[in-house]
Image (tube, grey):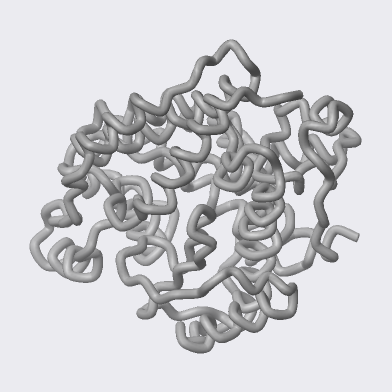
Amino acid sequence: MEIPKPVLTADQALHALLKRVAFSRYLNPCNAAEARQSFKKKGGPPPFEYHPLGEAPELLRALDAMSPSRDHPAGALVGECIDGVRRLVEALHHRTAASFDAMNQAAGWYEGTDALTHSYPSGSPAGPLNVLAPEMIEHFELAFAAREMNDWRVVPDEVMSARVLVDSAKRLVRINPKAHFRTLDMTRLVVHEIDVHAKRATNGAQQPLLCFQTGLPGSLATEEGLAMMAEETSGTASPGALARQVEVVRAIHDAREMGFRDLYNRLLERVGHGLAWGICLRIKRGLAHPGLPGVYAKDSVYLTGRNKVKAWLEDGGSIDHLYVGKVSVDDPISDWLAQGWVTPQPVPALWT
């Protein structure tokens, strides 16, 4: 399938924007530790502060200018990717519950509440948090070298709600220098972050469209679901991980009607203080007023994506298809391969 030049141009322009702007630095509060202390002492909602996305109007104009014709299938893919980035920019620009709700709705992140009807084994993460960030950074660098993925870099970054984050456009792994890790995390996170996220990005860069490197529309649930399945397949999954993800989905549902403090208190009925804070931080980040109803619902994809990928693989889906790039189980990958539009790519050894 020949891709029209305007589509390729739009795809390249979008990729250049994603390489230039690190959206995680605007999504996550830059004072999370201080906000937590204030939350503990004063009882009100945490006073999150953010780096302002001052260039939002410029980014929105650039996104409008790069939108391709959607008559061609590739144009439709690129156009939907542009739409997703536009909704993220608007959410980070306005930081209102309504702007985040529009993004959540379009991405399908409110789906999967049926997961609340399932139960999974409970358990606590195994072992002490005795691995410091510098050791984890070195471990990731060695893991990339062992896989001959030498164009990836590992850098410290304090403005994160997660401990580790993959930036596919820049081929970066960001690790919070203040984070602590368990011994199991050293193998688990390499499987999750490198053997899924980074490898799918590397493979996607070999396809005609660069959005295969950064993520096709609807691919995020498959991305995170596959990462969770990789942990299970490799025997590195944290005990009780699925049960904790049920709490995340439940909290996302509740946060649409609850502010940070009420949500935190409700979580304390079922989980400890640390996990309650972590969940609230993850799903209230980005919002200017976390004390009011509103939610960033992206984290619903871990459990819903895991269950969907598991069912897809058990139904005969080929793991090879999921490594042509950052694709979704809903994409017609078999057709694309048959047409020669995408090409097969290497699959990590953990799946063999």
Residue plotted at (30% across, 65% down):
159
Horizontal arrangement in the rendering, residue 331 relative to residue 351 (left or right): left
Q: Is residue 17 above or below residue 333?
A: below
Question: What quarter of the picture does the N terminus occupy?
Answer: top right
Residue plotted at (73% across, 40% down):
309
**Can residue 167 be seen here?**
yes
Measured as percent of width and height from the top left, residue 78 is found at 54, 28
Q: Is residue 251 above or below residue 41?
A: above
Measured as percent of width and height from the top left, residue 181 is found at 51, 79
Front-lying residue, 119 or 306: 306
Horizontal arrangement in the rendering, residue 346 relative to residue 22 (left or right): right
Horizontal arrangement in the rendering, residue 25 relative to residue 217 (left or right): left
Residue plotted at (53% across, 72% down):
153
Horizontal arrangement in the rendering, residue 91 relative to residue 74 (left or right): left
Which residue sits furthest top? 71
Measured as percent of width and height from the top left, residue 149 is found at 68, 70
Q: Is residue 304 above or below residue 76?
A: below
Which residue sits furthest left? 42
Question: What quarter of the picture does the C terminus occupy?
Answer: bottom right
Residue plotted at (64% across, 62% down):
192
Front-lying residue, 182 or 176: 176
**Can residue 304 be seen here?**
no
Q: Is residue 265 above or below residue 5?
A: below
Measured as percent of width and height from the top left, residue 26 is found at 27, 52
